[in-house]
Amino acid sequence: MIVLASLVLAGCTSTGKRPDLARLYETQALDPAQPPVILIHGLMGSTLVERDTGKEYWPGSLGTLAFSEYRELARVREVEARGGGLVPGDLFYGVARVDYYEALIDALERVGRFQRGTPGVPVHGDDDRRRYYVLLYDWRKENIHAVRQLHELIEQIRRDYGDPDLPVDILAHSNGGLIANYYLRYGTADVLDQAEFTPWDEGGKRIRRMVLLGTPAMGSVVSLERLQQGVKIALRTVPVEVLVTFATPFETLPHPDAGVIYSADGEPLDFDIYDADAWRVRRWGIFSPEVEARVLAAAPDHETGALQMAELQAYFVRHLARAKQLQLALGQPAPPTGTQVSVLGGDCTLTPGRAVLDRDPRNPRSERLVIRPGELRHKVAGVDYERLLLVPGDGLVTRESQLGRGQFEGVGAGIEAFSAASSFFLCERHDQLSVNPYVQNNLLHFLLAP
C-alpha cells in the first residue's frame, strides 16, 4: 500500500511541489466505517502540569526552556507517595516556530476529517464515527503504565462506539511505538519480571493497523550519552540526577544483543551496558564525582545528600535491569497477529549507532563511552571513526532500529522484532517526521486504505 504514496513523493521532490492531501483523500475521508485512530506521542511529547493547580512544568515558558534545568520533573518518591506530583496535560504541539504535532493533528482533522474524541462520550450516528484520540501518558514512568492506559482507552472506545469487538488504528511516534508494540504482543501483563515472555492472542483483535513513526524498536545509542551527560534542552541540560529518575531513557537503550560497544581500534567488545557495576566501577553518570558533588551541594546537609545519592543510584539500578528485560521482550520474534504494521522514518542523517570505549592508555580508569567521532580523545591511526560510529538514520534513531532489526553483523544480526507490511524512509530528522507532508501522505494512505 505504501508504494503508491512513494510514487507521489518521487514526483513531488522533482518539481518542488507538495501533495494536495485533502484532494488525494477526499473519497476515503467519507468512509463512516473507518476505525477510530489513537495517537501516541513520544518522549517529552506531552505537557506536564501540577495535579492540583494545573501549573505547567513541562515545557513551561520560553524562559523556562532557555534557562531551566527542570529539576522539578524529577520523580521524587515522597511526592508521588502522597498523591501529588505532575500529570500529563495535553500534547506538546510545538514551541516558538518549531512544530512537533500541530501539523499532524491538522492532517488528521482537515484531511482525514477526524474529530478529536473524548473518552466516555458515546458516538451518535455515522457523522460522529470518524474520531481520533490522544493517549496522554507520563513519559517519565515505565512504559508499562502507558500500556495499561492504552488498554483502558481501547476498552472505553469500544463502549463509546457500542461495539465490544471494535479494532482501532494506532499512530505512534518515537517512544509511543514501544508502547504500542508491547501492547500488541503482551497486552497489559508485566512480563519483565517473568522468566519467559508469554505473548497474548488479543493484540490482533484490538489493533487493525499500526504506524510506527521513528520508533527506536531496537533502542538508540544516544541514550548511552544521555545517561552519562544528561539531555540538552534548548540552552540548558537536564542533569543526570534528574534523568535517572525517569524510566524511559533506560527503556530506549540499545538491545542487549546489538553489540554496539567497540574499542578505539575498531574491534567489537564484549561489554554489557546493562551491568550496573560496569557504570559504578567506572564512575559514570549517576556514580560520577561531579554528579555526587551537585547532589550534596543542593542538599540541606551531608546526611540528607548521601541518602539522596543512594536513592538516585537505586533508581539507576532498577531502571537498568527493567529496561534490559523490556528490550529482550520487544526483540522477540513477533507472533502472527494479523495487525498490519507500517514503518515510517528518516535515513539521510548520519546517526550514532555504535559507541567507542575511549581510554587513556596511561590511565585505565579514564574510560568513557563516546558516540560522536569529534569527542574521542584517544584515537588510533587508520580507524575511520565516522564510518565506525555513525550510520544512516534520523539523527536519533538508526534506520535498522526503526525497522526492528539487529543493527550489525555478528552478534545480534539475526534479530527481527516485527514484520512490517510496508516501510517508507525519506530525508527528515526525528523530531520533524510528524510535520513532514510526505510522511503524512504515506501514513494517511496506509490508515485510510480499504
Image (tube, rainbow, N blue to C red):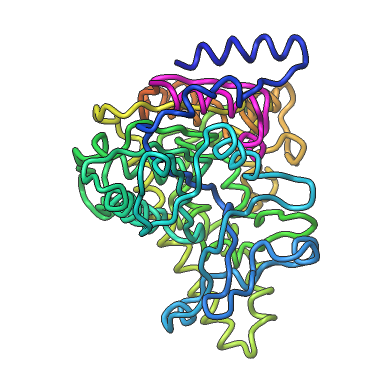
The quadrant the C terminus occupies is top left
Residue 192: x, y in percent?
A: 29, 52
Camera-nearest residue between 297 and 253: 253
Residue 305: x, y in percent?
A: 59, 82
**Residue 48 seen in the figure:** yes
- Please state if 164 lies on the left or on the right of 27 as rendered: left
Count of number-bearing discs = 0
Q: Is residue 94 above or below residue 257?
A: below
Residue 403: x, y in percent?
A: 47, 26
Camera-nearest residue between 117 and 329: 117
Residue 140: x, y in percent?
A: 51, 60
Question: Can you tell which quarter of the image residue 67 is in?
Answer: bottom right
Residue located at (57% from left, 70% from top): 74
Queried whether the magenta region covers residue 88, the answer comes back as: no
Q: Is residue 37 above or below residue 247?
A: above
Residue located at (49% from left, 29% from top): 29
Q: Is residue 3 above or below residue 164?
A: above
Queried whether the magenta region covers residue 438, the answer comes back as: yes
- Please state if 304 lies on the left or on the right of 264 as rendered: left
**Residue 199 seen in the figure:** no
Instruction: Give the magenta range.
Output: 421-450
Question: Can you tell which quarter of the image residue 382 is in?
Answer: top right
- Please state if 114 lies on the left or on the right of 55 as rendered: left
Residue located at (59% from left, 27% from top): 439
Q: Is residue 85 above or below residue 251?
A: below
The quadrant the N terminus occupies is top left
Residue located at (37% from left, 31% from top): 209
- Please state if 294 lies on the left or on the right of 410 as rendered: right
Camera-nearest residue between 437 and 290: 437
